[in-house]
Amino acid sequence: RRSVMMAPSILSADFARLAEEVESVTQAGANWIHVDVMDGQFVPNITIGPPVVASLRRVTDLPLDVHLMIANPDRYIEDFARAGADRITVHVEACPHLHRTIQSIRATGVKPGVALNPATPPEMVRWVLEDVELVLVMTVNPGFGGQAFLPRTVEKIPLLREWAGDRDDLCVEVDGGIDPSTAPKAVKAGADVLVAGSAVFGRADRKKALGDILEAIAH
Ligand code: DX5
Ligand code: ZN
């Protein structure tokens, strides 16, 4: 089986101590840092923007996996790229010209990804799969940490893998409600990047938090 990457979401971290929080999950073995950007329009919550990505860039060498939950993401791609994002993922529901948006992410040198809300059919990304590095299958409705995993969402993953054919390098990421009990379902379906917010930052022992998820998917 492909190796699984852990991408803790700083949404559930202490924003007043972000550098320490990132350090703690780095020590615990995190592979990427997942950054949730929300605008109060595409989703009913507001979080952070390019200045925080720039600050994170100065304190970590881990890839910054920026998940844009914003309307008209095209307006901000250059800002996030300049701030130091390694990956930028946009929602298909927010992009009427998805192919063009993906090309403009790539033009900045950042790896493009596309995200699907739970109610969005995987067919929406079928014709751009060869243009992206990552598909993010939302396993909750985006907007908040700590929500319950929606099991049917992972049924999209085998279809995406089938359509991607021999593109073994395509990352399939899941995000929302991932913990030791849900992670195995996502991995069995074919996910290889696990985002976890509350299951990691909600626990004092970050090594144990990541370890429990990795152990659950090991068998
Ligand atoms: C949800 C965000 C997630 C969130 C996951 O809108 O995209 O990245 O932080 O949090 P948990 O793991 O607590 O569901
Ligand atoms: Zn996210």
Image (cartoon, grey):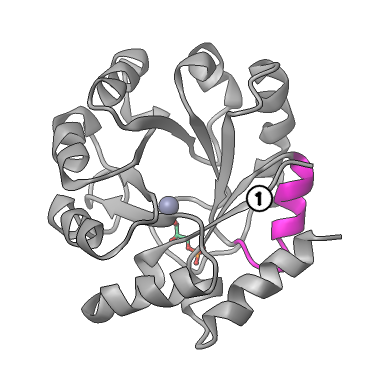
- Report crowding for label 1: few under 14, some 14 to 19, many 20 or more residues within 10 A (C-alpha): some
* Image location of residue 182, percent across then percent down: 71, 61
Query: Could you tell whether 124 is left or right of 185 in the image?
Result: left
Q: Pick out the residue farthest to the top.
A: 127
Residue at horizontal 74%, vertical 30%?
Answer: 158
Can you tell which quarter of the image residue 217 is in?
bottom right
Find out if the beta carbon at label 1 lies less than 8 Å from the nearest ligand 1 atom.
no
Which residue is labeled 1 in the image? 4
Query: Could you tell whether 64 is left or right of 148 in the image?
Result: left
4, 37: nearer the viewer: 4
40, 76: nearer the viewer: 76
Query: Could you tell whether 163 is left or right of 38 in the image?
Result: right
Is-magenta flag for residue 128? no
Number of labels in the image equals 1
Write down the region rendered in magenta: 178-189
Residue at horizontal 60%, vertical 71%?
Answer: 210
Element at label 1: loop
Is residue 115 visible to us here?
A: yes
Residue at horizontal 49%, vertical 80%?
Answer: 202
